Amino acid sequence: MTKEIVLFVLYSIVHLFAIATITKQDVFYLPSKIIPILILIVALFRYFPSLEKRGKLVAVGLVFSLFGDSFLALPKEGFFVFGLGSFLIAQLIYSYAFTLDSKIKPLLAIPFLLFGSSFFLVLVPKLGPLLIPVGVYISAICLMGWRAAARNSVSKPFYLGLFGALVFIVSDSIIAYSMFLKPEMDRFTASMGIMTTYYIAQVLIYSATKLEELDVRSVKNT
């Protein structure tokens, strides 16, 4: 593993430990949550001017993910919509990044459409004023999954990116399930599931991007 991946894993474990031992009110909680994503952002932005378009998009998507993490980690109520909006932008940026070398492939949209619409219909009675924001967000994560699946490449970066997108959907689904369908769910269990899958998703998307950047540079140098 590369240095940034090792650091990412270590600091991710630190935050998972923080979930088990402290609350959002603790001053250490927010930095422990965002440091893993900061590591990936710094790793990409070191080469930002020379990154290909997809690499730049993923770097910006990570920045908006960082904003989302920060809003959702704040102890005060009322920041959920801001966190949701930040992650919505990140999902749309990732979708565009995956679309750069993709064809439409409408048949691949069917499983994501079925999942998204079914999950939304189950959530509807519980959403109240969040009906539209959550509906838009579910559409965005399903769009990201579809565009990741529709890429023309079948290389290692393709599979890393696709699996990252799918795990991202799992992470967001756990959030919705624990918030709206089973609010009595143990917070520790929910948070551990959400953050473990979230970190896995982000590092997979990052790894896919880095491998593609290395491949492009290798071709340019030959």
Image (cartoon, helix red, strand yellow):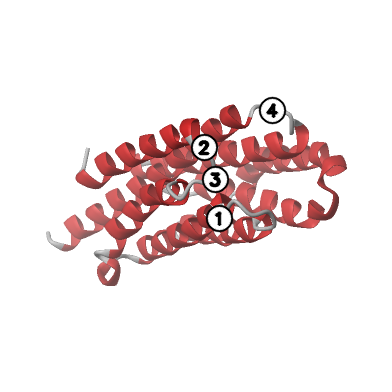
* Residue extending farthest bottom: 49
Foreground disc of the pair 2, 4: 4
Residue 95 % position (x, y) = 53, 56
Q: Can see residue 99?
A: no
Query: Residue 24 got which mark?
Result: 3
Q: Indicate the quadrant where residue 126 lies.
A: top right
Report the quarter where the N terminus lies. Answer: top left
Q: Earlier in the sequence, mark 3 or mark 1?
A: 3
Report the quarter where the C terminus lies. Answer: bottom left
Q: CA distance from mark 2 to mark 1?
A: 13 Å
Q: CA distance from mark 3 to mark 1?
A: 25 Å
Q: Earlier in the sequence, mark 2 or mark 4?
A: 2
Q: Can see residue 171?
A: yes
Mark 2 element type: helix
Q: Which residue is mark 1?
A: 91
Q: Earlier in the sequence, mark 2 or mark 1?
A: 1
Q: CA distance from mark 2 to mark 4?
A: 21 Å
The residue closer to the viewer here, 84 or 74, is 74
Q: Which residue is mark 4?
A: 185
In this rendering, the answer to whether 158 lies above or below 192 is below
Residue 20 % position (x, y) = 48, 30
Q: Earlier in the sequence, mark 3 or mark 2?
A: 3
Q: Which residue is mark 2?
A: 167
Residue 3 % position (x, y) = 20, 44
Disc 2 marks a residue whose amino acid type is: Val
Q: Earlier in the sequence, mark 4 or mark 3?
A: 3
